[in-house]
Amino acid sequence: MTSKVAIVGAGLVGATAALALAQKGFAVELVERQPPRLNRGGLGVDIRNVALSPASRTLLNSIGIWPAAAHYDRMVVWEQWGGSRLEFSATEVQRKELGWIVEMSPLSRDLWMACQASRDVHITLGDITAIHNTDDQVSLHLGDGKVITADFLLAADGARSTVRRLLKLATVQTPVNQVALATVVKTEFRHQHTAWQRFLVDGPLALLPAPDPHLCSVVWSQSPETGQRRMTLDDTDFLLEITKATEACLGQVQAVDQRVVFPLRQQQVKNCYPHPRILLIGDAMRVVHPLAGLGVNLGFEDVDQLVKVASRQQNLAFPDLWRRFARQRQARSRAMIGTLDMLKRVYGLGGPGGTLLRNTGVSAFNALPALKRQVMIEAMGLGPLSSPD
Ligand SMILES: Cc1cc2nc3c(=O)[nH]c(=O)nc-3n(C[C@H](O)[C@H](O)[C@H](O)COP(=O)(O)OP(=O)(O)OC[C@H]3O[C@@H](n4cnc5c(N)ncnc54)[C@H](O)[C@@H]3O)c2cc1C
C-alpha cells in the first residue's frame, strides 16, 4: 500500500519534495505556516537569491518547474590580503553554465501554486504544536485544534525546525559568529554572467549576476558588529564601501536596494531518522554557511535521493528503509560543514603566514586541472559525492 506522507514546511525543499512524491503516486499532506509572498525590491529583483546547481535544475525540471533565472558561466574568487586568484569556467567542464541565480520568492510561489494545482497534494495552513507517533501512524496537532494523520512524516521546516524541537532532537553546532548582509546593487560595468567572490578577512563578499546585466545580488558575510554598522550607513557611504570592498571589479557600485541582515549558523541534527516514520531534510537536517551557495542545493539532493528510495518501496515506514539514506546524507552534511568551516578559517587568516599558505594552496590547486575539474563537477551536484548511487 502506498504511504500517505505529511510534510511540514513548504519552503523550497518541502514544496519540491511534495511535488516529486506526488508525481510518484504518494498522497501528500503539506502543512505550512504562511503562504509565500512575492518580494521585489526597488531595483525590481528579490533581495533573497540562491545559486542553483545543474543537478538542482534537473530536479526542478523533473517536476515541471523552472523560473526565470540568470545563468553564470564563470566564477572568479580572489582575496583581500594576497594575490591568490581562482577562476572557474564552464568550458573547463564542457558545459554552457556552472549554475543559475534564482530569485527565491518567485520560485517559492511557483512551487506553491503547483502544489495547489496538484490533485495529490493537500495543503493545510497552520502551525504544528505537537507530534504523536505510534507503531501505526504519525499525527500532527495544529494550533487551531486540527489533527493530521499520516504514515510517514518529512520535516522540511527549516533551520529553526519545530519538528526537531518537539521531538527534542539534538544538533551539533559549528560556531560561525558572522551575519550575512543581503541586498541588490546596480554596477557601472556588466556582470558578464560571472559570480564574483572576494574573501575579505572579515568574511566573503559575493556579487551574483541577475537577469539585468547591470544588477547583482549581494551576499556579504561579516562580523555581527560590522554588519550592524553597515546597516546604519546611508546609501552613499555604503556604495563607496562596497565599491572599495569589491576592488571595483564591476566599476563603481551606483545604486543599492534595501539591505537585510541574516544571522549565520552551521548546524546539523545528530540523527535525521529518529523514528521509522520520521525523516528530516533540508535546513531542518543541516544548515551550512552561504559562502559556497550550497544550502538549497543540499536540500534538493536530499529530495532527489529520497525520491529514488521511495520509487523502490511504497511503504515509506518499512523498517530501516532510510538507514542508508540517513547515513549518507549525514556524512555529506558533516563533510560540507567541515569544508566550509575550514575555508572560512583559512581565508580569515591575515598576515604573511596566512597569505603564503593560501597562495601556495591556490597555486597547487591551479596546477592540477584534473582535481579542479572534479571539484567543479562536485560543486555542480554532478559528482559521486553528491549522488552516491
Ligand atoms: C544570505 C543567504 C544566502 C544563501 N544563498 C544560498 C545560495 O546561493 N544557494 C543555496 O543553495 N542556498 C543558499 N542559502 C541557503 C538557503 O536559503 C536555505 O538552505 C534554504 O532556503 C532552506 O530551504 P528549506 O526549504 O529547507 O527551509 P526554509 O526555506 O526555511 O523553509 C521552511 C518552511 O517551513 C515553514 N515552517 C516552519 N516552521 C513551521 C511550522 N511549525 N509549521 C508549519 N510550517 C512551518 C516555514 O514557513 C517555511 O516556509 C542562503 C542562505 C542565506 C541566509
Image (cartoon, rainbow, N blue to C red):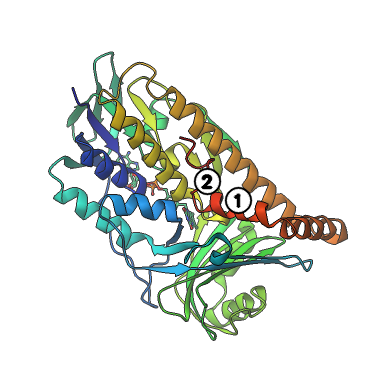
Q: Is residue 354 left or right of residue 224?
A: right
Residue sitting at x 20%, y 48%:
115
Residue 160 seen anywhere in this rendered image of the structure: no
Q: Is residue 5 left or right of residue 169?
A: left
Residue sitting at x 77%, y 60%:
363
Q: Amino acid at mark 1?
A: Gln
Question: Helix, strand or loop at disc 2?
Answer: loop
Q: Which mark is residue 229?
A: none
Question: Helix, strand or loop at disc 1?
Answer: helix
Quadrant of the image occupied by residue 160 = top left
Q: Nearer the viewer, residue 359 or 263?
A: 359
Q: Amino acid at mark 2?
A: Gly
Residue 347: x percent and y percent? 72, 56
Residue 150 seen anywhere in this rendered image of the structure: yes
Q: Which mark is residue 383?
A: 2
Residue sitting at x 63%, y 49%:
177
Residue 192 to residue 204: above or below = below
Is mark 2 in CB contact (under 8 Å) with mark 1? yes
The residue that disc 1 covers is 374
Quadrant of the image occupied by residue 45 = bottom left
How far is disc 2 from disc 1 in space, using C-alphas?
8 Å
Residue 95: x percent and y percent? 49, 63
